[in-house]
Image: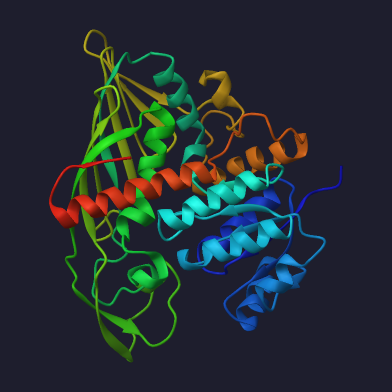
Amino acid sequence: MPPLTAAVVGTGFIGPVHAEALKRVGVNVRGILGSSSEKSRTAAGSLRLEVAYNNYAELVADPLVQSVHITTPNKDHLEMTRQALAAGKHVVCEKPLAMNTAESAELVALAKQHPNLVTAVNYNIRFYPLMHHVRDLVQNGEIGEVYAVRGGYIQDWLLFDTDWNWRLVPSEGGDLRAVGDIGTHWMDLVGFITGLKVESLLADLATFVPQRRKPRQAVATFKGKEESASAEYDLVDIKTEDWGSMIFHYAGGARGVMSVSQVSAGRKNFLNFEISGSKGSVAWNSENPNEVWLGYRDRPNGILIKDPSLLSDGARRYASQPGGHAEGFPDTFKQLYSAIYGYIEKGDFNAPKPYPTFEDGHYELMLCEAIADSHNHRKWVDVK
C-alpha cells in the first residue's frame, strides 16, 4: 500500500507540529495552507513541502491528498470539516472541535454520514506513553474505586497586557478561552484515564487583565513573549477568562476539581492530575512527563520511570524509546498519528477507534457550555 498523503491547514505554532509528526510516522505531507499565499509559501519552504496552497478549495480538491489536518482558529473548524468530508478526506481537527455544541453536534452527525472516513480530534496529551499505562492501571482497579481527581492546566504566556493572541477574541475562538483552549485537554485526559463522566459542575471564572494592547501586526501563538512590545497597538477590552476553577460531580459519586490559568507566572505548560482511589493514588504532570508518582498508605510510595519493559501491554506500543530515553510533547503527536493512520491502513472502520473522535470533542464542548452557564448564573449545572 502506498504511503498516505496529508495536507495541513494553518501555519502558526501547531500546524508545523502536525506536519513534522506526520513525516515521522511515514505519512507524506504534500502541502500546507496559511492565511495568505505568502504564509503558505514561507511555511512550505521551511518544512520542505511540495505545495503551498493558495486557498482551501484548492487544498480539498487536490486528488493526491487523502487527509486534512485543521489547525486554524476555532471559527473555521465547522466549514473546513464540512468541505473536507464532502471531498472524501479524512479529518484530524484541533481542539476545541467547534465554537459551540450546535456546531459540534453537526460535525458528529456529518461524521456518521461518512463512516469510512476518520474524524479525529487532536487530544494529543492522551498519547504520552505513561497516560495509557495509567489508564490501564486505573481501569484495572489497581488504585481501587476512584474517589477524587484534582489538578489543572496552567501557563503564563498571557500574563502581561502586551501579550496577544487570536484566542483572546470570542469571534475567533469562542466565548471560553482558557477553559476551551487548555481546560478541554485536562477534561479529555481525565475522562480517558478514568472513564468517568461529569453529571454536574460548579464553575468560577475570572479575567484579571481586562484590557490588552493588541499589536497591529499578527503575533504567532507563544511568540509574543519572545518579542519586545509592539510600538503600534490598539487597546482592546477582554471578555474571555484568564483563569477558572471548576468542581465536578462524576457519575457514580467521584468528585473532581480542575483549575486553569494562562496568567500563572513561571508555569510554561503545566498539566497535572492526582487521582485518589480506595487502594492508592496516582499523579503526573506534563512538565515531567516520563515519571508517574504512585501513592499508598500501607507501603512505600513509588516513582515509575517510563520504560517499555515496565509498561502495560496497551501502553507499550506508544513508547518508541527504551527506558531512560525521554519522550516528550512532539512525540505525543507522532503516537496519535500512528494510531490514526494505522487505523486507516487496516481499513476496518467498524473496529474500536484508538484515537479521540468527534464525539469526544462534542462532549468537551458540552462541558464548556455547562461551565459558562454555571459561572454566568452562579449555580450548579447538570450536564445533559
Residue 286 locus on image (x, y percent): 39, 42
Indicate whether 253 appears above or below 110.
Answer: above
| Quadrant where the N terminus is found in the figure | top right
Judge left or right: residue 226 versus residue 281. Answer: right
Colouring used for the render = rainbow
Q: Residue furthest top?
A: 298
Taking depth in this image into account, of 59 and 285 the one nearest to the observer is 59
Q: Residue at x 60, y 64 (%)?
A: 80
Taking depth in this image into account, of 344 and 154 the one nearest to the observer is 344
Query: How many numbered marks does the figure carry?
Result: 0
Q: Residue at x 33, y 16 (%)?
A: 143
Judge left or right: residue 236 versus residue 120. Answer: left
Indicate whether 31 appears above or below 135.
Answer: below
Residue 4 locus on image (x, y percent): 78, 50
Q: Residue at x 65, y 41 (%)?
A: 340
Taking depth in this image into account, of 139 and 263 the one nearest to the observer is 139
Q: Residue at x 28, y 77 (%)?
A: 162
Q: Residue furthest bottom?
A: 232
Judge left or right: residue 303 versus residue 130. Answer: left
Indicate whether 128 appears above or below 160.
Answer: above
**Is residue 260 among what the camera can see?**
no
**Is residue 39 among what the camera can see?**
yes
Residue 357 locus on image (x, y percent): 54, 42
Q: Residue furthest right?
A: 1
Quarter residue 157 falls in: bottom left
Residue 384 locus on image (x, y percent): 33, 40
Indicate whether 59 appears above or below 127.
Answer: below
